[in-house]
Amino acid sequence: MIFIFGTRSSVRPAVQTDYACPACGREHAIFAVPQQRYFHVFWIPIFPIYRSYSMVCGDCGGLFDTAHMPVPKEVKQQVKTPKWTFIGLIIIALFVVFVAITGSSASSDRKSGAMAKIENPTVGDIYQVKEAYKEYTLYKVASATKDSIYFYPHGYTINKKSAFDELKADEFLDEDDEYVEGFSKAELKADVESGKILKITR
């Protein structure tokens, strides 16, 4: 079975201590060997978890428990967390920034395109509109003047913006109903900025 995520450890360079070896008696022979534990996904390090130590004699090879031979504070201060154990977090952060920039750019393009359509409306343009919380509908341009645009509103609403295709093209309150709604171009542009007008299509 292949595990795509989990924890792994990496042995860091050993640091010499002032301890004498209890086994062979050699002075300053004990080395603290750090092991950095980190979480990974598909073997890509995501973030460090904790660090443990082994106390080893560089002379006789004796291995000692840190419970009886604590790692000195100055040794711990010398051991730094490897930067590569943060690779996953860096990738995630860069992805979030990329999505934010891309989304902001797409939103800016959408707004500028909508503003242009409001400034130069065409009869038959369809406005996707958010009227209230979970209430969406369509408006179709009926006519326009220099400062205002007049619409045939759709006869129905939907409760999610992904379902605009459910609103049929022949269900607008059109000239047969003798009903139009008018808005100034300034109002419509403000609605684009606020997000009330979601999209303008043909």
Image (tube, grey):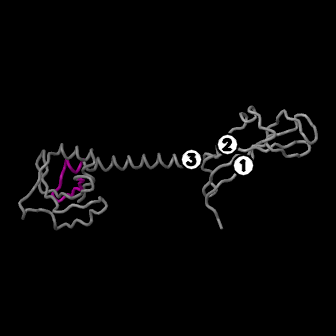
The answer to whether mark 2 and mark 1 are in CB contact below 8 A is yes
Report helix, strand or loop for mark 2.
loop
Residue topped by disc 1:
10
Nearest the viewer among 138 and 5 is 5
Image coordinates for residue 42, horizontal then vertical, percent: 61, 58
Nearest the viewer among 114 and 99 is 99
Nearest the viewer among 131 and 165 is 131
Report helix, strand or loop for mark 1.
strand
On residue 82, the disc is: 2
Real-space Cα distance between discs 3 and 2? Answer: 13 Å
73 relative to 44 in the view: left or right: right
Real-space Cα distance between discs 1 and 3? Answer: 18 Å
The answer to whether mark 1 and mark 3 are in CB contact below 8 A is no
**Mark closer to the chain start, 1 or 3:** 1
77 relative to 17 in the view: left or right: left
Q: Residue furthest front?
A: 68
Q: Residue at x 34, y 48 (%)?
A: 107
State yes or no: residue 117 in magenta.
Answer: yes
Image coordinates for residue 160, horizontal then vertical, percent: 29, 59
Image: magenta residue range: 115-130
Residue topped by disc 3:
89
